[in-house]
Image (cartoon, grey):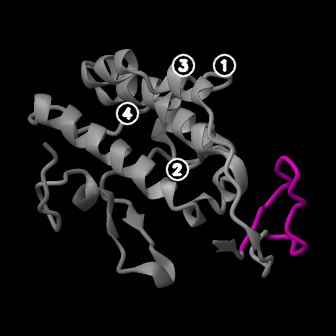
Amino acid sequence: MTVNLGPYGALHDTAPNPQADGLGYNPRPLKRDVGPAMNMRYANASTVWNLLHKPNIKEYRLLLEGPFNTGEIGPHGGGHYTINGDPGGDFWTAPAEPAFYLHHGMMDRMWSLWQAIDPETRHVDLDAGAYGHRTWNNEPPSPLTSLDDAIDMGYVGEGSVIRDQMSTIDGPHCYLYK
């Protein structure tokens, strides 16, 4: 498989894309660096169990993503680092890695299962903590995210609002994980 975009910054044994935004044509072979260490630490059965039993979105996100500025990356980041390689290790072009969709499918499944445990309370409030802002870790400072904030999909698809994307069984979606 040939990867054509990225990486935005240098990866292990891959120079950064010659175009400053990382989106220039840069054909090279797909490389993976799959290893068990990150998966065993961040995406193990105990983590999955603990994630499903978090009582609110703030605690769910802190485990899923890891607390800011601690070096802990949670199962979301752990899955990315388990795949790693090129483009899996590049934040901006990771979707060019086919396994990226399996990983994010599992993240979606966990979200759906977590909501199903207590559907009345599990997707109402987005939280005012570090993950509640429009910018990562509120840097630069930004307003809190609202369920009515727009999601602009650009050329990829039709836009919507966050509220319509919160559930896999309500709104425009109609699928259920087993």
Where does label 1 land, which residue?
Answer: 70
Identified by mark 1, the residue type is: Thr
Residue 48, placed above or below residue 132: above
Lateral position of residue 5 relative to residue 145, left or right? right
Q: Earlier in the sequence, mark 1 or mark 2?
A: 1
Q: Secondary structure at mark 2?
A: loop
Q: What residue sits 52% from the left and 21% below the top?
A: 40
Where does label 2 land, which residue?
Answer: 134
Q: What residue sits 45% from the left and 39% below the top?
A: 132
Q: Nearer the viewer, mark 4 or mark 3?
A: 3
Image spot of residue 24 (x, y percent)? 79, 79
Q: Secondary structure at mark 1?
A: loop
Whole-angstrom CA distance, mark 4 to mark 3, is: 26 Å
Identified by mark 3, the residue type is: Arg
Q: Nearer the viewer, residue 67 or 112?
A: 112
Assess disc 3: are there few (<14), some (14-19) or many (≥20) residues with their C-alpha within 10 Å of its C-alpha. some
Where does label 4 land, which residue?
Answer: 127
Q: Earlier in the sequence, mark 3 or mark 1?
A: 3
Residue 75, placed above or below residue 111: above
Q: Nearer the viewer, residue 103 or 111?
A: 103
Where does label 3 land, which residue?
Answer: 41
Region rendered in magenta: 5-21
